[in-house]
Image: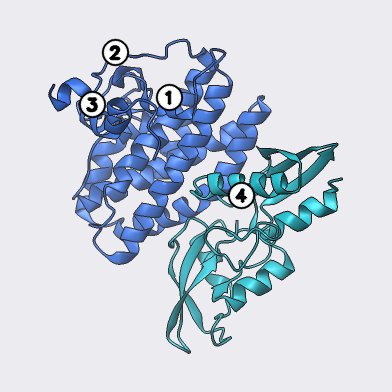
Chain colours: A cyan, B blue
Amino acid sequence: MVTVERVWEALGEIPDPEIPAVSLVDLGVVRAVTVEGARVRVEFTPTFLGCPAVDVMREQMAERINELGAEAEIDLAAEGWSSDRITPEGRRKLEESGFAPPAPGAAPTTLLQLQEIVSRCPYCGSEDTRLENLFGPTPCRSIRYCASCRQPFEQFKTI
Amino acid sequence: MSEEDLIRPAGSRSEGSVPESAQRILELADDELILGWRNSEWTGIAPFLEEDVAFSSIAQTEIGHARAWYELAARQTERGGVDADALAFDRDPDEYRCAPFVETRLVPDWARTIARHWLYETADAIRIEALKASGDPEVAGLAEKIDREETYHRMHADMWADRLRDEARFRGAVDELWPSALGLLEPGQRDRLCEIVGREPVEANERGEHTEELRPLWEEMTMVRRSVPGASW
């Protein structure tokens, strides 16, 4: 018999297609799981609408649920993703893999607000870092530079 | 048979039957798709690496927003078999609802590119704000989601506008594009744009007629789809 807990556990083992160190559950991409007999419904929300990994995520979730012996229905949630949805565990794993987690709290609406955010280098821990580019290799990340260890690094955008 | 014969010409397939409410959504979707396409033309050739990354990322997000709007329009279209890809790629150029403002190819003119980027993001913020108050919860929800992502486009556009504000080429580009920029918005929303941009209203270059530049873009954008119906990649 498939249980909600079992499904969450299985989804928590699926690595993010772009940052395999964190799982879809760590990222807060999975919103809700409901089980009715042998049918499992998952509501999820990609980090950004333009995220090219959406279809891969969908397939991987369905596959894992099928392995549990249940039928899967994977739907996009009505609510959007926010970077506050990344779990404490997810933030820790991001930092360990060289990504600065998003600054907590309200999303900045101006460049000045964004530049005032203190951000710690995931490599050396220095707070002497600066914004290098609002945009990065994926829609959810920006590029920063650490003046202390002279290393560029990627930071999750706060949205 | 020549390559031309294999590629379905414009006018041979039309989805038609898209209801009026969905047609309004298509204006937004088409603006985002076509501008996303134009912005992606900077990939690999922007003036410096940071902007190469920025314009590529902005293009990707815009096309993602277009997809979300097309999916919504497809759900509101009663006739089955219409999906986001069909709306994006299977209509004839004349059926697109995008504003002339987004159609022009501006590579390699950086001043005009930044002028359009800034005017577009400023106008887009006004209409997204209005859509967040829509009576249709699906429209309002999607507008809210898109607004949060667009914040980063606006920061980028404002940063450049601040930097180039006193440059003659940039000011000339804003002068040139201003009537088309007004055409992005509903008449009732245009005063707000004039206020933010600090310009007087002029006669707008309205949505409806396309420039000559849309067709070549469409030919390129839909070529694979017309060559191999149902192709996915």
Occupied quadrant, residue A24: bottom right
Instruction: Name which residue type carries label 1.
Output: Ala
Label 4: how many Cα within 10 Å (few below 14, some 14–19, many 20+): some
Residue in the picture at 66% in, 52% down: A29
The vertical placement of B42 against A131, above or below, is: above
Disc 3 + disc 4, Cβ < 8 Å? no
Mark pair 2, 3: CA separation: 15 Å
Q: Quadrant of the C terminus of chain B?
A: top left
Q: Secondary structure at mark 4?
A: helix
Disc 1 + disc 4, Cβ < 8 Å? no
For disc 3, the marked residue is B215
**Which mark sits nearer the N-terminus, 1 or 2?**
2
Chain under label 1?
B
For disc 1, the marked residue is B86
Q: Are marks 1 and 2 on the same chain?
A: yes
Mark pair 1, 3: CA separation: 17 Å
Mark pair 3, 4: CA separation: 39 Å
Label 3: how many Cα within 10 Å (few below 14, some 14–19, many 20+): some
Residue in the picture at 21% in, 23% down: B6
Residue B221 point in image, percent of width and height: 29, 34
Instruction: Name which residue type carries label 2.
Output: Ser
**Which mark sits nearer the N-terminus, 2 or 3?**
2
For disc 2, the marked residue is B12
Instruction: Name which residue type carries label 4.
Output: Gln
For disc 4, the marked residue is A60
Q: Secondary structure at mark 2?
A: loop
Residue B232 point in image, percent of width and height: 40, 36
